[in-house]
Image (tube, grey):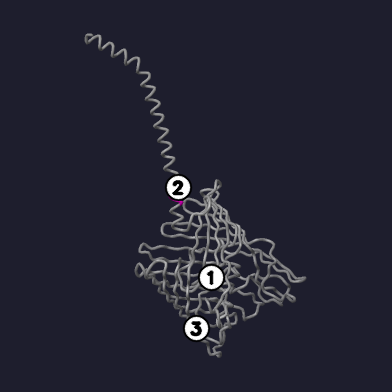
């Protein structure tokens, strides 16, 4: 066979085999594409599984199905020397464990004052939470308790009752929205604005501080979030007895929940929250009753400096009642005609934290609140409270902190009589 014949034969054979080879190539390409898709899906599933496993290993353990369980808390031991400027402190008062402005003893100085030492571990706490991935979004639950009971017996066992702090479920039904139901910090309160303190709260006199049952909706935005909440109401009124025989101060006669709207934002190094509170303030006592509308506004936040230092602040005004200074003031007064005369309160705090080193830091803070009491109320009611403190905290490792704090607090009555509390407090705290 000559070269020309061989070439023609090769072309003929190639022509006959080409469709088959081409078809095989197409099938191979499709098969490769399918394998690549399966590989990408497998990688995504492995990444998700790894993330869940890492999360479980860091914060808890993997439970049945898609639920992750975790628990933690801290042990906090407090020891303090307290000096009251006038008279003897109240026996077994909650103010022995941490600052409660309304318990500061007032007088003309003739009482001679009182110096005492106290130690306890009542603010230690434990929490448990879950997170479950479902086809309608993540569902989280959280429950927390401490042992902050001032009636503990110090003579034998020092046993204190446990108290429920938080218990709620939070449904993240979309990437940007969630619904919370249960008891936790009031939406009117910005927990992120609270400074680091040795005292249980710190700038108590000017702080919005309250936990209560609520239903809260949260919507996330690119640079902030919006919260709407309906929360458990309660009314506190002064001068029971003026209004024709009203015998108590606290009332549970509200027909509407407290309503809160809050916006959380961030601008550069400043993070802030602006909140508006609307309340029904009401009472019923026999044939006597009245109700009126109260309000509150609060602005709080934190400014972070480049060197790690920060300033935290809060300013609030309105018919704040139990919301501020651990109810140093009431919502209003019952007048002689049985009507409610609302009480306006203005308060706030500022706190500066300085980092001395990676393990050593200090916070200097000042807080105050003042009430515009009704002219018909008793002159022995609290007119203003304040407290200032400075501390030094050392953490040899992140979970373990030792602290010392010096605090001066003051309470003044409507008639001008006042009293102060000086306290030197030490703490050891281990978070787990």
Which residues are the magenta region?
47-52
Where residue 55 appears, x then y in whole percent?
45, 54
Give the left or right position of residue 189, taking residue 38 as reference: right
Which residue in the structure is indicated by mark 2? 48
The answer to which of marks 2 and 1 sits earlier in the sequence is: 2
Residue 49 lies in the magenta stretch: yes
Q: Which residue is drawn at 39% across and 25% down?
A: 26
Residue 246 falls in which quadrant of the image?
Answer: bottom right
Q: Between 109 and 114, which is closer to the camera in this rendering?
A: 114
> Picture coordinates of residue 388 (x, y %)?
47, 76
Q: Distance between the residues labelled 2 and 1?
A: 48 Å
Q: Main secondary structure of the magenta part?
A: helix
Task: Residue lying at the far front in this picture: please name it.
Answer: 1
Q: What element carries label 2?
A: helix
Give the label on residue 347, or none: 1
Which residue lies at the image location 44% right of the left edge and 56% below the top edge? 57
Q: Total marks drawn? A: 3
Residue 411: x %, y % from top left = 55, 79
392 or 292, nearer to the observer: 392
């Amino acid at each position: 066979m000559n070269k020309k014949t061989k070439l023609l034969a090769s072309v003929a054979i190639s022509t006959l085999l080409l469709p088959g080879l081409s078809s095989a190539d197409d099938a191979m390409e499709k098969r490769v594409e399918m394998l690549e898709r399966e590989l990408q899906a497998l990688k995504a599933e492995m990444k998700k599984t790894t993330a869940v496993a890492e999360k479980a290993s860091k914060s808890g353990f993997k439970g049945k199905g898609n639920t992750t369980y975790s628990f933690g808390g801290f042990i906090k031991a407090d020891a303090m020397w307290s000096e009251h400027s006038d008279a003897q402190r109240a026996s077994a008062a909650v103010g022995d464990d941490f600052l409660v402005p309304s318990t500061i003893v007032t007088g003309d100085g003739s009482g001679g004052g009182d110096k005492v030492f106290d130690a306890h571990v009542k603010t230690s706490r434990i929490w448990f939470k879950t997170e479950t991935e479902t086809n309608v979004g993540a569902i989280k639950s959280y429950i927390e308790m401490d042992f902050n009971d001032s009636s503990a017996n110090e003579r034998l066992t020092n046993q204190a009752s446990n108290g429920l702090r938080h218990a709620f479920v939070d449904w993240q039904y979309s990437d940007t929205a969630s619904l919370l139901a249960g008891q936790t910090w009031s939406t009117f309160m910005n927990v992120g604005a609270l400074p680091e303190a040795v005292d249980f709260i710190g700038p108590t006199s000017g702080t919005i501080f309250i936990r209560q049952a609520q239903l809260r909706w949260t919507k996330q935005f690119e640079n902030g979030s919006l919260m709407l909440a309906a929360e458990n109401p309660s009314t506190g009124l002064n001068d029971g007895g003026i209004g024709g025989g009203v015998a108590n101060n606290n009332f549970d006669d509200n027909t509407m929940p407290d309503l809160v709207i809050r916006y959380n934002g961030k601008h550069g190094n400043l993070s802030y929250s602006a909140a508006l509170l609307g309340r029904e303030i009401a009472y019923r006592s026999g044939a006597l009753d009245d109700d009126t509308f109260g309000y509150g506004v609060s602005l709080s936040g934190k400014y972070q400096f480049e060197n790690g230092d920060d300033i935290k602040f809060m300013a609030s005004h309105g018919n704040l009642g139990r919301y501020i200074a651990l109810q140093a003031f009431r919502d209003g007064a019952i007048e002689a005609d049985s009507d409610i005369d609302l009480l306006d309160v203005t308060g706030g705090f500022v706190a500066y934290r300085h980092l001395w080193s990676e393990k050593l830091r200090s916070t200097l803070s000042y807080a105050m609140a003042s009430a515009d009491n009704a002219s018909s109320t008793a002159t022995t009611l609290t007119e203003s409270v304040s407290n200032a403190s400075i501390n030094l905290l050392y953490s040899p490792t992140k979970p373990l902190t030792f602290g010392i704090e010096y605090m001066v607090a003051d309470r003044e009555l409507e008639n001008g009589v006042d009293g102060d509390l000086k306290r030197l407090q030490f703490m050891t705290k281990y978070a787990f």
